[in-house]
Image (spheres, grey):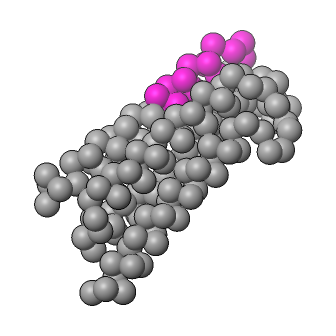
């Protein structure tokens, strides 16, 4: 079983490392601020401020991780096709990395923003994994 899903495991590692890096970036840019208070973001900050964008990128990844991780674990447990699972896991991981880069680079309150499209790609990958699980369970 380990060898069948090795590419998906690498995708999970990539997701976890992405979140770790986002946390380090968010913490470090905030800590460099004068009068920074640990654990508190100034409520007056908006998209024009990189501290806000770094913090929101990190929180957005944390908010979305349980659904994708649960879907991946369920997919492995029910035995979905390893190739398609890895395609969707890596699609999600790459979409989240591009989402992060765009959130860091573009200060906009426009909706949808360019990062929104990559959020949507990640969401579709997540839904795709749930569909694979449902099909597999239906076939059982």
Position of 55 with respect to 21 (left or right) is: right
Residue 38 seen by the camera: no
Quarter of the figure that contains the C terminus:
bottom left
Q: Quadrant of residue 45?
A: top right
Q: Quadrant of residue 37?
A: top right
Q: Residue at x 40, y 45 (%)?
A: 90
Q: Position of residue 103 (x, y in %)?
A: 67, 31
Above/below status of 138 relative to 111: below
Q: Residue at x 33, y 52 (%)?
A: 86
Identify the main secondary structure in magenta: helix
In depth, the one of 140 and 60 nearer the eye is: 140
Q: Position of residue 13 (x, y in %)?
A: 32, 41
Q: Position of residue 128 (x, y in %)?
A: 48, 64
Q: Residue at x 64, y 52 (%)?
A: 120
Above/below status of 33 relative to 40: above
Q: Which residues are magenta?
A: 21-35
In depth, the one of 107 and 98 nearer the eye is: 98
Q: Is residue 25 magenta?
A: yes
């Amino acid at each position: 079983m380990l060898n069948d899903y090795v590419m998906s495991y690498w995708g999970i590692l990539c997701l976890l490392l992405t979140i770790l890096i986002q946390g380090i970036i968010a913490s470090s840019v905030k800590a460099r601020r004068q009068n920074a208070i640990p654990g508190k973001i100034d409520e007056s900050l908006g998209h024009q401020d990189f501290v806000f964008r770094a913090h929101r990128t990190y929180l957005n990844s944390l908010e979305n991780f349980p659904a994708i991780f649960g879907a991946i674990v369920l997919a492995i447990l029910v035995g979905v096709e390893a190739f398609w699972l890895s395609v969707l896991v890596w699609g999600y991981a790459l979409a989240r990395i591009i989402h992060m880069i765009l959130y860091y680079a573009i200060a906009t309150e426009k909706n949808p923003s360019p990062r929104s499209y990559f959020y949507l790609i990640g969401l579709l990958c997540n839904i795709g994994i749930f569909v694979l699980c449902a099909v597999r369970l239906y076939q059982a």
